[in-house]
Amino acid sequence: MDRISWDEYFMGIALLSSKRSKDPSTQVGACIVDDDNKVVTIGYNGMPRHIDDSKLTWEKGEDLNNKYLYVCHAEFNAILNNRDGSKLNGCRIYVTLFPCNECAKALIQVGIKEVIYLSDKYQDQLSTRASKKLLDLAGVKYTKYQGRYTNIELK
């Protein structure tokens, strides 16, 4: 029987969630899971709710024409999407891209105990190096995803 592991299942949910993102260059998804392997909340990177995202840029431009000023990251959205108030303390997050320093701060604040990530393509950037420093100082474990499946193809 070809049964997927818990890690493959939860990263699959994060990958599927990333497909909701309208970001043309980097679609990111996140899935927060408790110790009982129950999905608590999910998120993907996108513009804030109730904003017509066609009026904002998806480019990495200058001044106000820079998507990073507007986009809510997948990890941040997963935290905010926790509508039933489930405790995130002690949970794990599966995320398709290693969290930036701002998301790392939020993950630490809500008590996430482990980050399982698929890609670390920005590992040399200041925000990722700061993120790792924050996670290390807070005792939050981060683990590279080792599952068999690294993408979701929708037809």
Image (cartoon, grey):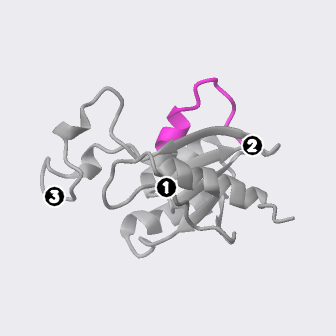
Above or below, 45 relative to 52: below
Q: CA distance from mark 3 to mark 2?
A: 38 Å
| Quadrant in which residue 136 is drawn | bottom right
Please state which of residues 22 and 73 is positioned toward the viewer in this rendering.
22
3 or 2: tag closer to the N-terminus: 2
Q: Magenta residues, as a range?
A: 76-89
Which residue corresponds to mark 3?
61
**SS under mark 1:** loop
* Image spot of residue 130 (x, y percent): 45, 64
- Judging depth in this view, the residue of 108 and 35 nearest the camera is 35
- Asked if residue 146 is positioned above or below residue 50 in the image, the reply reads below
Q: Is residue 92 left or right of residue 52?
A: right
The residue most toward the front is 155
The crowd level at tag 3 (other Cα within 10 Å; few <14, some 14-19, many 20+) is: few
Residue for point 46% across, 51% down: 19
On the rendered structure, is 34 left or right of 133? right
Name the side, left or right, on which 152 lies relative to 141.
left
Q: Secondary structure at mark 2?
A: loop
Q: Which residue is painted at 20% across and 39% down in the image? A: 54
Task: Give yes or no for contact between labels 3 and 2 (Cβ–Cβ under 8 Å).
Answer: no
Which mark, by number, is residue 144?
Answer: none
Crowding around mark 1 (Cα neighbors within 10 Å: few <14, some 14 to 19, many 20+) is few
Residue furthest out toward the bottom: 124
**Callout 1 amino acid:** Lys
